[in-house]
């Protein structure tokens, strides 16, 4: 049975009707030629109308993913179109350290979230967030220091930005079953992607409708009440190609008070209106209802990692998290309640609508205009307070891409500009102890607006057949405007007397980001890369009004963080069975924005560390060493330290120079050994064993308390076969055991604040281990099975 939330069901039916209508319309258009967008266009003359082709019974072979610009074949006859070149800037920009995770790497496993697939790329680190599919995604440690959501990188879905103008991204709307490939672009990238791209970018690519060519239905289910029904439909007919994905996922969760129910719809449609004009429409909708546990201290994690026996505060077992709530909902005496008792959770809705128009002036020049409306509506009683608000944003981008010659050398030039804005007022309410996240009186309200506008230019030129040079620059102005009103109720049990403290800020930041890269490809086996680039990220308005103790106040002196990074890399592929990529990087940060937890659950404090250095090594390898056997590995080494930072605590100062930046694991490895039967009666049967290793890391600026590392082992068996039928195309079955040895481990540990005694002595690790609002445990041993059937 395929279950849908009413909103998601309505969206799916509406999109299904739209897809059917547009397909019928496209079939009726007999005056327009069928055009392949990514194919080279030799001439603009309209070809003669061709006869309809008879549909083959055999399944189509999936389309090969678009090759990055850096490996595009040389020679004029093999040039890609300017439209495809522009797409490549979101997928694999030349000179950039980049990994593409193809669907074949996760199609035979129950991929619940981005955590199950992004670990296949080096440089990526994942931590559990506030919800079932809400994860903190970090590139080179960029987001490991943030308390919630995704910061310091920019995310796209089919080239449409899903990072809002204030720099916040959430992964709730990402169901990996929807995607055909995921591009991971690493290193400072603001010259190309603008504000917040200090760590890089991610581009999630749904499957084109022609690749699906029919309907697919799948279902995953397993431990802790997990069930995910999903559907994919797609078609390419004449000048129209469209794909629709919809899923309904729910589960009880493995931690107390962590059940969830979430629906996702993702639609992409492209219409070739004329030989020179293409329109693309994008829609993403996600509805999330979830309960949320309270983050633990390290000692609570050791006592009760999965928050069991935490029904009420009065009867709570040792190690249960709790919140302190005003009995009357605004002041006076308080009661202590658990997450279950208080009804903590999230009820969020996200809708993204985008449109893109591409116009080809000729065979060498394409003009692209893109508009995105992104509305994030939240209701989040995550602790003693609840955040409510609607966050609509608008994003417009326009650019011109030209492929041709410059001084007799092959050249790709891109120039463009953008404007995006978000304006809203959000309110924070006190949660009362009446249960079911009942609201008391408001605690504060925040008016905020963020506006970014800028221009960018980029040039790629092939100096000689083996050497390509890339230069780019971006300029951007960011205007923040915030008015924070902190409310107080000075008279006990009298809500009529209200005090208000108003703090305002309207900073303007102007940033410039250049980059330069060289690619040397001496032969078909080797590619060498060198790059120097810059990134920048401005504070968010909400950062300007939170003090270290979690209360509202003046934190308006925050500055833009900037980084200058150097990359040296090599890619080696001597044959189809062996691929190795290695990159060393060194990045220098100024005014790095670092977040740490406060005593108020769900509230983080942000500060600038004047100078810090990030350096590391990224390795990726795959080896098909015998028929059917394959070994893959993705390894990251990070060494990130403060080089200029003095911290003040209760009037006492402490030098943090040389200390490791908290939240950053120095070593992470994902390796997989798999086998798939290549022929014979058991063809399509396979399996793999996977090992994940995450090293321990410091949780505080003083480097006194460490979150322990872990090693996990996962086992998978799967079977894929083509079906000989008039209706069915293929069948995919899989079964997976995760965390085979039932290891208890930390899936997320937010940074904690150091504290001092009255004499100014820093409290030791034994005291810091009692700091709450930090840790979520990872899943114990789990069994998940799934199947997917494709219809013609």
Image: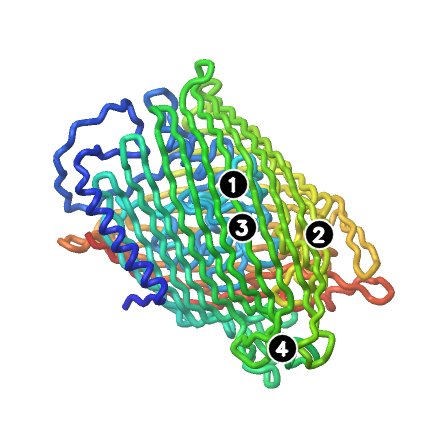
Q: Where is residue 144 in the image (x, y as percent from the top left)?
A: 60, 53
Circle 1 — which element?
A: strand
Residue 142 visible in this rendered orientation of the protein: yes
- Decide: few, some or many residues near mark 3? Use Cα within 10 Å; few <14, some 14-19, many ≥20: many
Calculate the distance from the C-alpha at mark 4 to the C-alpha at mark 2: 29 Å
**Residue annotated with mark 1:** 419
Mark earlier in primary sequence (3, 4): 4
| Number of numbered discs on residues | 4
Q: Quadrant of residue 334?
A: bottom right
- Tell me which numbered mark, 1 or 4, is placed earlier along the sequence: 4
Q: Which numbered disc, 2 or 3, marks the residue that appears first in the sequence? A: 3
Q: What element carries label 4?
A: loop
| Separation of marks 1 and 4 at Cα, in angstroms | 41 Å
Residue identifier under label 4: 329
Assess whether mark 2 and mark 1 are in contact (beta carbons under 8 angstroms): no
Quadrant of the image occupied by residue 322: bottom right
Q: Are marks 3 and 4 in contact (CB under 8 Å)?
A: no
Q: Which colour scheme is used?
A: rainbow
Taking the spot 32% from the left edge, 50% from the top edge, the residue there is 676
**Residue 177 horizontal/vertical position (percent):** 36, 55
* Label 3, label 4: how far apart the Cα atoms are: 31 Å
Q: Which of 581 and 597 is in front in this view?
A: 597
* Mark 1 Cα-neighbour bin, 10 Å: few <14, some 14–19, many ≥20: some
**Label 3 sits on residue:** 422
Label 2, residues with CA under 10 Å away: few <14, some 14-19, many ≥20: some
């Amino acid at each position: 049975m395929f279950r849908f939330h009413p909103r998601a069901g309505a969206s799916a039916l509406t999109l299904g009707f739209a897809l059917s209508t547009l397909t019928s319309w496209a079939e009726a258009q007999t005056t327009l030629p069928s055009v392949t967008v990514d194919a080279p266009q030799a001439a603009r003359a309209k070809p003669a109308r061709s006869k309809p082709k008879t549909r083959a019974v055999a399944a189509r072979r999936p389309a090969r993913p678009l090759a990055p610009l850096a490996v595009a074949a040389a020679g004029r006859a093999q040039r890609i179109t300017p439209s495809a070149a522009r797409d490549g800037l979101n997928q694999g920009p030349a000179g950039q350290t980049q990994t593409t995770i193809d669907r074949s790497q996760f199609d035979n496993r129950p991929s619940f979230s981005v955590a199950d697939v992004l670990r296949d790329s080096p440089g990526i680190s994942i931590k559990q967030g506030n919800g079932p599919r809400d994860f903190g995604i970090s590139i080179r440690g960029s987001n490991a220091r943030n308390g919630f959501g995704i910061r310091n990188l920019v995310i796209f879905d089919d080239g449409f930005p899903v990072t809002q103008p204030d720099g916040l991204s959430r992964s709730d709307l990402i169901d990996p079953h929807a995607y055909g490939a995921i591009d991971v672009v690493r290193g400072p990238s603001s010259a190309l992607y603008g504000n917040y791209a200090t760590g890089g970018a991610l581009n999630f690519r749904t499957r084109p409708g022609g690749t699906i060519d029919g309907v697919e239905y799948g279902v995953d289910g397993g431990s802790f009440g997990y069930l995910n029904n999903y559907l994919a439909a797609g078609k390419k007919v004449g000048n129209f190609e469209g794909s629709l994905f919809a899923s309904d996922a729910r589960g009880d969760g493995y931690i107390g008070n962590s059940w969830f129910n979430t629906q996702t719809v993702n639609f992409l449609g492209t219409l070739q209106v004329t030989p020179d004009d293409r329109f693309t429409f994008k829609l993403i909708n996600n509805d999330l209802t979830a309960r949320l546990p309270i983050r633990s201290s390290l000692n609570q994690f050791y006592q009760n990692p999965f928050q069991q026996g935490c029904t009420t505060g009065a009867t709570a077992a040792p190690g249960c998290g709790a919140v302190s709530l005003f009995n009357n909902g605004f002041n006076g005496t308080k009661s202590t309640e658990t997450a279950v008792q208080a009804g903590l959770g999230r009820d969020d809705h996200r809708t993204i609508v985008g449109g893109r128009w591409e116009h080809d002036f000729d065979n060498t020049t394409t003009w692209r205009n893109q508009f995105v409306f992104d509305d994030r509506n939240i209701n989040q009683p995550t602790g003693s307070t609840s955040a409510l608000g609607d966050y609509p944003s608008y994003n417009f981008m326009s650019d011109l891409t030209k492929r041709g010659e410059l001084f007799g050398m092959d050249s790709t030039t891109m120039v463009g500009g953008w404007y995006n804005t978000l304006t809203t007022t959000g309110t924070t309410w006190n949660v009362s102890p009446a249960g079911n996240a009942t609201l008391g009186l408001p605690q504060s309200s925040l008016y905020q607006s963020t506006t970014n506008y800028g221009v960018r230019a980029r040039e790629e030129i092939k100096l000689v057949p083996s050497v390509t040079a890339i230069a780019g620059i971006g300029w951007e102005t960011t205007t923040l405007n915030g008015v924070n009103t902190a409310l107080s109720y000075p008279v006990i049990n009298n809500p009529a007397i209200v005090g208000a403290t108003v703090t305002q800020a309207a900073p303007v930041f102007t940033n410039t980001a250049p980059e330069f890269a060289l690619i040397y490809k001496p032969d078909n086996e080797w590619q060498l890369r060198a790059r120097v680039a810059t990134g920048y990220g401005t504070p968010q308005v909400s950062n300007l009004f939170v003090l270290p103790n979690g209360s509202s106040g003046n934190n308006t002196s925050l500055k833009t963080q900037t980084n200058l990074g150097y990359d040296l890399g090599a890619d080696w592929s001597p044959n189809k069975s062996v691929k190795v990529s290695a990159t060393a990087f060194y990045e220098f940060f100024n005014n790095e924005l670092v977040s740490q937890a406060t005593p108020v659950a769900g509230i983080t404090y942000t500060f600038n560390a004047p100078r810090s250095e990030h350096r590391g090594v990224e390795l990726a390898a795959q080896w098909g060493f015998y028929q059917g056997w394959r070994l893959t590995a993705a390894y990251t080494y990070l060494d990130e330290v403060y080089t200029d930072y003095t911290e003040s605590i209760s009037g006492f100062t402490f030098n943090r120079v040389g200390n490791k930046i908290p939240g950053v694991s120095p070593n992470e490895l994902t390796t997989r050994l798999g086998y798939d039967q290549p022929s014979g009666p058991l063809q399509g049967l396979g399996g793999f064993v996977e090992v994940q290793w995450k090293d321990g890391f410091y949780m505080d600026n003083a480097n006194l308390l460490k979150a322990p590392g872990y090693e996990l082992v996962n086992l998978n068996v799967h079977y894929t076969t083509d079906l000989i039928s008039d209706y069915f195309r293929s069948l995919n079955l899989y079964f997976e055991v995760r965390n085979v040895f039932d290891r208890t481990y930390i899936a997320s540990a937010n940074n904690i604040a150091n504290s001092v005694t009255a004499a100014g002595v820093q409290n030791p690790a034994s005291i810091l281990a009692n700091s709450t609002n930090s840790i979520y445990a990872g899943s114990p041993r789990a069994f998940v099975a799934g199947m997917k059937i494709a219809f013609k």
